[in-house]
Amino acid sequence: MAGAFEPILTAGIGRMALERIEVYESQGGYEALRKAVRQMTPQAVQKEVTDSNLRGRGGAGFPTGRKWSFLPDDGRPRYLVCNADESEPGTFKDRLLLERNPHLVIEGIMLAGYAIGAARAFVYLRGEFRQAYEVLQRALAEARRRSYVGDRVLGSDFSLEIVVHRGAGAYICGEETGLLSSLQGGRGEPRLKPPFPATAGLYGQPTVVNNVETLACVPSIVSRGARWFASIGSPKSPGPKIFSVSGRVRRPGNYELPLGTPLREILFEHAGGLEPGRRIKAVQPGGGSSAILTEAHLDVAMDFDSVAQAGSMLGSAGVIVLDDRDCIVEAAQVLAEFYAHESCGQCTPCREGLHWAARVLRRIVAGGGRPEDIEVLQSLPSRIAGRTICPLADAGVGFLSSSLKYFVDEYRAHVTLGRCVREAYVA
Amino acid sequence: MTPEWAQRRAVVDEILQRYPERRSAIMPLLHLAQESRGYVAREDIEAIAEILAMTPAQVESVASFYALYVRRPRGRHTLTVCSNLACVLGGARSLVEHLRQRLGVEPGETTDDGLFTLQVTGECLAACDQAPVLQVDGYYVHRASPDKVDRLLEALRRGVPMAELADRAALPHEAEGGAQGGARPETPAGPGKGARADGWRL
């Protein structure tokens, strides 16, 4: 069946300059928006998205239509925020869409804004994405000129302005409440949920936060219908998905495939497999935050539920591959340093615990490991994960706890020998 | 209010009207300050506080949360090397080593001629398929081999705008045969390193 799948979100990238509005229009671009504002009620657009069973592509996999339905109908202004703060290690799909297919994202935002009756839409764009910012600003100017964005869209009564808000370097702003704190002009510190953004979001008003790729799915759902979308991929996780593959594969890159494509197919048929003579050691299927899978898991279907059953998470679908030359302990240290650095500092288990993890790992890698370190590392995850305001703490121990499960001998060898038994980690 | 902020009134007003609440303008105003001066100075903090009816301490507390706002002058170009997992697998450490030698500075430092500031970040720069990666002033340099980095430094010294040298996000089939940045280098840790690519000649 995979042969029958045609890319939807990335169609045309590399063959034509989709960032130019006339090129995007020549491919049927903005027809979905035209159809919606002329022939459909907002409720009908929302129903189509609900029936399509589109699930959030930012990582949580929450049904998008349901998220929209939580907005209370109480007359307060509503806001739509496109989460374009892509910072999850191993993930580079949103940047591709923003740089190379910006109008698809804009059209998705306009459709979602129409469906929920947004008073204003914001794109929270990662501060490091300078090219994406320039491309998006040009695309928005074109879209305003052609009446797809702004006052009275295509002559209808629907008006919506899109504001691009640039972040400034903080991983935590990808978490929706951290993002909203930041967008309100504060530090990007998450807050407890509930209340959820749907009832108390931006400025305390009802707010929807959707990921770039999630919104990019909406135009095709509106133009081709919920049934068509729901028929792609896994029944419970339908639709196209961009898998960002990196690490030890011969053809790293973004691959748009149906959700539920087996991990083995993604790695070996699409990403070119491994270097000759190498074996898979560990794979993070859902970004730096996800628990590792091993060779034994290669037949897992890459959808939200199946990857969860395998003990990890689909997350952002950033697939990072390690092979037999790679040192698990050093990889754990690289990730631990990152999460420790990105902790916002509000919660003690995260602020202190992730730093402890990083320090112990740093010492082991430097050759100063002690036998009791293994126990310390094993005891950390349960004292950190699930005990904080936001999931960064859980993310910070995903690799650590799962690698201790599968590769504890390698940790022990590191401590005993004072160095890695493997080849040099990198040349 | 300094003269330069007084001159920016129109730009500031445009920024303010993007948001239902004034305080949301703090980040764009900090970006504005940094883009015009190269860093955020104390007088910028005070001006922004005045514009938004906040105290300077409140503005400082927001500015200090975000890694991209810097409070001291830097070189004309900032080179930021990604050192997250995929880039480390792809040779980020040798890339940092190469840059240290070529520039004669440690991470965090600026070259004596004021041209380059070297930075190493743990933040994944979202270009893992192009490892190892660095950003120059926010623009990407993919598959940053020693040769490519040397050519880049040379072009920047000649004053070529970074926007003209930047690599764009690409799909795998576009990278075949090398994108605009030149041919695909060997993966630093790849097998066959030092192997003869031309086969054995009799």
Image: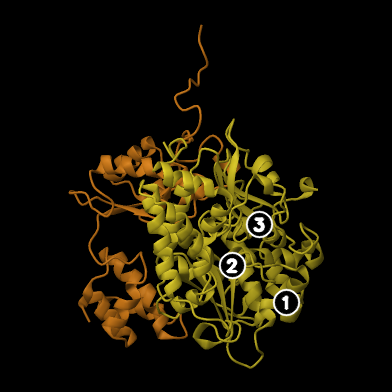
Chain colours: A yellow, B orange
- Badge nearest the viewer, 2 or 3: 2
Task: Residue A56: give x, y in percent of width and height.
Answer: 65, 67
Residue carrying label 3: A9
Cβ atoms at labels 3 and 1 below 8 Å apart: no
Residue occupying image coordinates x 48% and y 64%: A380
On screen, B163 above or below A155? above
Image quadrant in which you'd find residue A62:
bottom right
Label 3 CA crowd tier, 10 Å (few <14, some 14–19, many 20+): many
> Which amino acid type corresponds to the residue marked 2 in the rendered image?
Asn
Nearest the viewer among B135 and A294 is A294
Work out whether residue A288 can be spotted: no
Work out whether residue B83 can be spotted: yes
Whether labels 3 and 1 share one chain? yes
- Specify the subunit that label 3 lies on: A
Per the image, label 3 sits on a secondary structure element best described as loop
> Which amino acid type corresponds to the residue marked 3 in the rendered image?
Leu
Residue carrying label 1: A46
